[in-house]
Amino acid sequence: MYRQSKCWREEKQWCIDNLRGKSFRKQVGRLVLGCAVYVLWIERNSRTLTGICKTIEQLFFSILASVSEEVAAGGRSNAPKLICPYA
């Protein structure tokens, strides 16, 4: 999916309008959003506190690995329910 980014208020409204519901696609969309926010938050803390930075590719693959594992487990993974375990 490609769409142009907008201001935060419009982004928030887009998420509310497009990620609400129980369909598989919407559940994965919420999972990706939550994981992306978590990975970026951890990265910000890492850069601020330790000065260590990951590449964009590393961040992307952290998100992808987490989402893939959760989807493959069908939401029934035995791991503690973390938003993004690979961050």
Image (cartoon, rainbow, N blue to C red):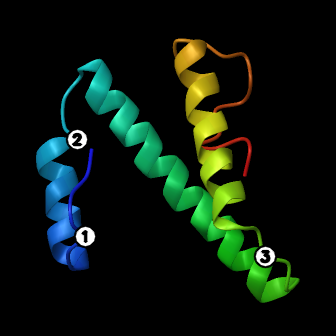
Side (left or right) of 8 relative to 76? left
Query: Which residue carries the number 1 mark?
Result: 5
Residue 14's place in the image compared with 43, above or below, is above
Point out the tag, 2 or 1, that comes first from the N-terminus: 1
Quick check: marks 3 and 2 in contact, CB under 8 Å?
no
Numbered tag placed on residue 19 in the rendering: 2
Q: Secondary structure at mark 3?
A: loop
Give amino acid for label 3.
Cys
Image location of residue 81, percent across then percent down: 64, 32
- Alpha carbon separation for disc pair 3 and 2: 30 Å
Tell me if 60 is positioned left or right of 20 in this view.
right
Q: Residue at x 66, y 77 (%)?
A: 44
Q: In the rendered view, would you say 41 is above or below 44?
A: above
Q: Which residue occupies 16% across, 57% down?
A: 14
Sequence-earlier tag: 3 or 2: 2
Q: Are marks 3 and 1 in contact (CB under 8 Å)?
A: no
Q: Is residue 10 left or right of residue 53?
A: left
Q: Residue at x 19, y 38 (%)?
A: 20
| Badge nearest the viewer, 2 or 1 | 1
Residue type beneath disc 2: Leu
Q: Quadrant of the N terminus?
A: top left
Residue occupying image coordinates x 24% and y 22%: 22
Depth check, front residue: 21 or 65: 65
Q: Position of residue 41 (x, y in %)?
A: 61, 69
In terms of secondary structure, where does tag 1 sit?
A: loop
User: Compared with residue 81, is residue 22 higher up or lower down, i.e. above or below?
Assistant: above
Disc 3 marks which residue? 53
Crowding around mark 3 (Cα neighbors within 10 Å: few <14, some 14 to 19, many 20+) is some
Mark earlier in primary sequence (3, 1): 1
Please provide percent x and percent y for residue 46: 78, 75
Mark 1 closeness class: few <14, some 14–19, many ≥20 residues within 10 Å: few
| 16 sits to left or right of 29 | left
